[in-house]
Amino acid sequence: MGGKIEFRGCYVAVVTPFKGDGSLDEAGLRANIDFLAANGVAGVVPCGTTGESATLSWDEHKRVIEIAIEQAAGRIQVVAGAGSNNTAEAIEASKFAKKAGADAIMTITPYYNKPSQEGLYRHFKAIAEVDIPMLVYNVPGRTGVNMLPETVERLCDIPQVAAVKEASGNITQISDIHRRVAGRITVLSGDDGMTLPVMACGGAGIVSVIGNIVPAKMSRMVDLYLKGDHAGALKLHEELLPLSQIVFIDTNPVPVKACMNEMGLAAGPVRLPLAPLSDATMDKLMAVWKTYR
């Protein structure tokens, strides 16, 4: 199978919707995926950070992946979250995603362990033996470890590694990664507000949080840039920038879930240790969000 998949466009890091009692809202998840597919996204990424993967049980994780694959079938790609700070666990999650029929997996740099660059390389190399296309995810603000451009370049020699999602916030690092890997693997932005700069440095799209609530606009912004309409993309980027900023006024996905609930989309509560927004923070969020409604 290897890394033969094209990562291009707007992928949405989907929330995991919960009912009032905290259980998984399966019907809501299906409806959300329908909404995203109808609004032009390239794919969905279930069971990532935005999907509260850290507090899903293994049974819930598997069910979310299954539903996403069933609901997206034949319409958009499914890149299944399969990350862990335990390499063996990440391998098992990847095997499940492959068996379930995911197009690819997204697997994060191990968190808490703080592995060396050699450790990062060996972690991803071990997961690659599952033989499913891989989107490797660098988000040092969440994990405590930054995957360096030299390590990403080494990963290019692993056929299953098809792309890197870069959320370091360091545009110089992201540009250096593209300089090293261009033509071998794809670079995707991991920050909504940096999508346009990342594409200007050779990136091919975004794994988006705000795509949950403005999928058509985020998809169009990416598509305009990739088609060469840089002025049109810049206009949309600047229109969306205040939203890209405000949805991180609190820990993701708390704000974006609040926006989805206000829209009538399935989101529900967040799970502890995440907490609902304070009234003051909600007011700030809604003051911006209402301008996009």
Image: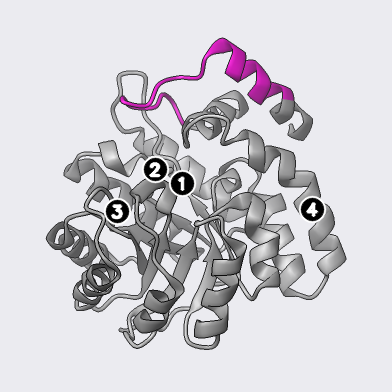
Q: Earlier in the sequence, mark 2 or mark 4?
A: 2
Q: Relative to the observer, which residue lies in front, 131 or 266?
A: 131
Q: Are marks 3 and 2 in contact (CB under 8 Å)?
A: no
> Magenta part of the protein: which range?
267-287
Residue 6 is one of the magenta-drawn residues: no
Which amino acid does the dot numbered 4 rest on? Leu
What residue is at 20 percent from the left and 39 percent from the top?
Answer: 57
Measure how far apart labels 3 and 1 are at the Cα level: 14 Å
Q: Amino acid under label 1? A: Val
Q: Which mark is residue 236?
A: 4
Callout 4: few (<14), some (14-19), or many (20+) C-alpha neighbours within 10 Å? some
Q: CA distance from mark 4 to mark 1?
A: 22 Å
Q: Quadrant of the N terminus?
A: bottom left
Q: Residue furthest left?
A: 88
Q: Residue at x 44, y 58 (%)?
A: 72
Labels 4 and 1 touching (C-beta < 8 A): no
Q: Quadrant of residue 228?
A: bottom right
Q: Which residue is mark 2?
A: 51
Q: Residue at x 36, y 24 (%)?
A: 19
Residue under numbered circle 1: 14
Give the mark, 2 or 1, whose residue is nearer the N terminus.
1
Q: Which residue is mark 3?
A: 66
CA gap, disc 3 and disc 2: 14 Å
Q: Does 271 lie within the magenta span?
A: yes
Name the spot of residue 138 as percent of width and height, x first.
Answer: 42, 60
In front: label 3 or label 4: 4
In three-dimensional space, the C-alpha distance between marks 2 and 4, rounded to whole angstroms, equals 26 Å
